[in-house]
Image (spheres, rainbow, N blue to C red):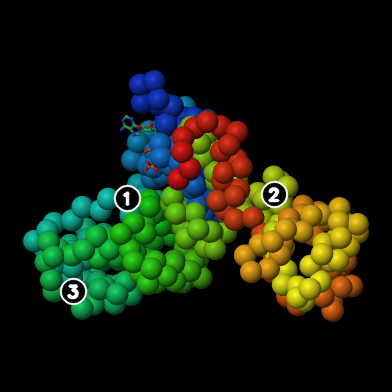
Amino acid sequence: MNVPVIEARGVTRTYGEVRAVDGVDLDVAPGEIFGLIGHNGAGKSTLIRLVLGLVAPQAGEIRCMGVPVLGPAFRDVRRQLAYLPENVAFYENLTGLETLHFYAKLKGLTLSAARPLLDKVGLAHAAQRPLRGYSKGMRQRLGLAQALLGTPRLLVLDEPTTGLDPAGIREFYGILEDCRARGMTIILSSHNLAEIEGHLDRLALMSQGRVRATGNLDTLSRELDLPVQIALKLKPGVEQSFGAWLARETGLKLAPRGEGYGFTCTPARKMSVLAALATRGAEVLDIDLKRPSLEDVYLEHTAAFAGGSPC
Ligand code: ATP
């Protein structure tokens, strides 16, 4: 089996009375896009800083690419990590290109790496402009370009899409998919559950410094037995008889939903209900299934812990 890129065991970090990260166990596999999800103050940024060796745990151990973080061999591993913090700070008087040149030099890379990255993040047109004239979204793009310098093996992004417009967000996730396809491992935290949902291989739900659940969205929603929503478009005039048949056959209750009708059922019953619906093909003009969203899973998990408002 491949060595996990990150292995955390019993990791704890406190600040005074606050247990920012509290006994966390976590594995992140090579080549996955892994999400840290949680409310404000859940401990996501602290966990990220622990993983990167920017702060030390008071208990537990973290290995990064098989090497203990903060141990003597971590120095070499660190060169293969890149981090985009939540608020990127740059020198305002440098241009975008000069900024990337500066970081390329710091990382011991040739300057030729800079321009293609500015193209990649959609900043080619602003390469010669000083950063004091950059918008928040442009700074985020530049931050991503800086993080990608040197093609790191692990890319860690804290709230990376803050300030990006919808097109920028789409481009951003396109770049991440491309990085993953080339074998990079990516850890990102976000509050925007709808936005992040389709891009994660696995995720950890955090609250009050603890990891409450890990897995992919399907597994987590099946574990919680969250209902699937089924929306129907019915032949006009059959609503009553169809509703009566559904109740008799399945015990489920049909209700008006938007321009059509719908009902919910457990994931375990989904296939048998669909099979029953297939026998009524003449009355059912269209069917839509909506599986539980990341927000549904998050809210169901955090409902048990009065740890803060949803994202
Ligand atoms: P957000 O989504 O708001 O960025 P987060 O999930 O990233 O939150 P953290 O920033 O990790 O949460 O904070 C977790 C807890 O630890 C919070 O209660 C925070 O106030 C506390 N904390 C984090 N860093 C420090 C610090 N340097 N000094 C004191 N307390 C801290």
Residue type of the residue flagged with mark 1: Glu
Disc 1 CB within 8 Å of nearest ligand 1 atom:
yes
Query: Which quarter of the figure is the N terminus placed in?
Result: bottom right
Residue 270 picture location, percent across and down: 80, 59
Q: Which mark is residue 10?
A: none
- Place residue 45 in its image quadrant: top left
Please name the residue that numbered disc 2 is placed on. 226
Please name the residue that numbered disc 1 is placed on. 86
- Place residue 256 in its image quadrant: bottom right
Q: Secondary structure at mark 1?
A: loop
Residue type of the residue flagged with mark 3: Ala
Residue 201 picture location, percent across and down: 57, 59
Query: Which quarter of the figure is the C terminus placed in?
Result: top left
Instruction: Give the camera-side residue of 234 and 289.
Output: 234
Please name the residue that numbered disc 3 is placed on. 127
Outermost residue, top side = 17
